[in-house]
Image (cartoon, rainbow, N blue to C red):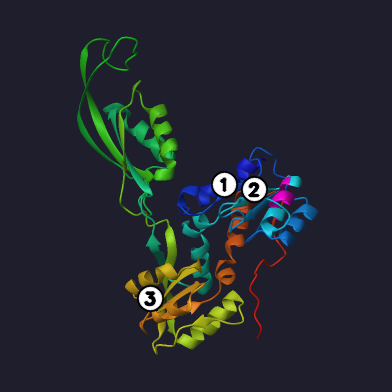
Amino acid sequence: MTIKDIIQVIEKSAPRAYAEEWDNVGLLIGNEDDTANGVLIALELTETVLQEAIDGGFNLILTHHPLIFSGIKKINPHDPTGRMIRQAIAHNIAVYAAHTNLDNAPDGVNHILARKIGLQESAILSPQQHQLSKLVTFVPVQHTQKVREAIFAAGAGCIGNYDFCSFAVEGEGTFRAGEQTHPFVGEVGKYHTEKEHRIETVFPTYLRRQVVAALVAAHPYEEPAYDLYQLENTTGQAGIGVIGTLPEPMDEKDFLLRLKQILNIPVLRHSGFIGKQVRKVALCGGSGSFLIHSALERNADVFITADLKYHDFFTPDKKMLLVDAGHYETEQFATSILLDILKQNFSNFAAQISVHSTNAVKYLI
């Protein structure tokens, strides 16, 4: 098994296309063609985690937060990032990061946090834009089903929880085969008409290459005609944040005490209580202050996130309880997601979560 094999199963669950433009995800250090000897998983790479990988014989480290995030001008032993890059390379250890692509994934960081809290009827708080495309192609009537099945198998035709979605209308195609062609129907040099179906379907934009390849392979024509369109529709599957409801309303203070217990955190920062029951909960693991207004627009009773600034707590204007539950604490379950992906796909492979906490924030109680 190669490192590339592991990357492919991770990116099937958390496609790299779901990452935000400013992010740096994927294989940051190493060669994807190397054999994978074992995987160590951590929220971020620290020198302690790296030493654990060295001692345990792991040659691939999966993290949520990227080790290399912004531009690096020097790699030397005088800063932690430089030291870790040098040591990872020296010990032939690959480093892979699944960051905002795992945040935005259909069963990613925010969804597992929502399940831990017990939210029901969960939906994406801010769906991603420009993740859908439409394919239109023209197929001889008798070959319609074969082509449909091929592009469906490649990942096209899904709308929400429905699959095999397409539309077809019959029409008349015309063409004249030129010299050096081998037409499936018609004759070289002669004008030809053919009853065809115009097939339309949607697909995730990141699957464009696979869908087009499947179409070309299944289509009977030597030169299949097809059109691709970028759609403005949202998928409802990918996006940042989650909003859902508790099974029963809770008192604000009781809800926060329960949240502390779930996240195993000694302290929470929050805005003033507003004197109403908590039922609708919005959340965003990690730094999510940019979603405060989205939570307000969705009439959330509480919004849970991290890294809030002082003035952020004024924004809800007593319409919503705002909670800073810590960056590490709200994303801590990312490691479990990565481990589950590997276990589901590679049952007899050495993969484990680091025994070390990488949380840099400490609390004096």
Q: Which mark is residue 215?
A: none
- Please report the residue visible at 29 percent of the width from the left and 27 percent of the height from the top: 142
Whether 315 is drawn above or below 149: the answer is: below
> Dominant secondary structure of the magenta stretch?
helix
Q: Where residue 286 sits: x, y (%)?
A: 52, 67
Crowd tier of the residue under label 2, counting other residues whose Cα lies within 10 Å: few below 14, some 14–19, many 20 or above = some
Q: CA distance from mark 2 to mark 3?
A: 40 Å
Q: Where residue 263 sits: x, y (%)?
A: 58, 75
Q: Earlier in the sequence, mark 2 or mark 3?
A: 3
- Please report the residue visible at 44 percent of the width from the left and 36 percent of the height from the top: 210
Q: Where residue 217 sits: x, y (%)?
A: 42, 27
Name the residue beneath numbered marker 1. Answer: 9
Residue 333 visible in this rendered orientation of the protein: yes
Whether 323 is drawn above or below 27: the answer is: below
Crowd tier of the residue under label 1, counting other residues whose Cα lies within 10 Å: few below 14, some 14–19, many 20 or above = some
Q: Which of the two marks, 1 or 2, is nearer to us in this view?
A: 1
Q: Amino acid at mark 3?
A: Ala
Q: Amino acid at mark 2?
A: Phe
Q: CA distance from mark 1 to mark 2?
A: 10 Å
Q: Is residue 160 left or right of residue 26?
A: left
Q: Which residues are magenta?
A: 84-89
Crowd tier of the residue under label 3, counting other residues whose Cα lies within 10 Å: few below 14, some 14–19, many 20 or above = many
Whether 29 is drawn above or below 139: the answer is: below
Question: In front: 289, or 241?
Answer: 289
Name the residue beneath numbered marker 2. Answer: 346
Residue 121 visible in this rendered orientation of the protein: no
Name the residue beneath numbered marker 3. Answer: 300
Q: Secondary structure at mark 3?
A: loop
Q: How many marks?
A: 3
Q: Is residue 86 magenta?
A: yes
Q: Is residue 110 magenta?
A: no
Quadrant for residue 264, please give it. Answer: bottom right
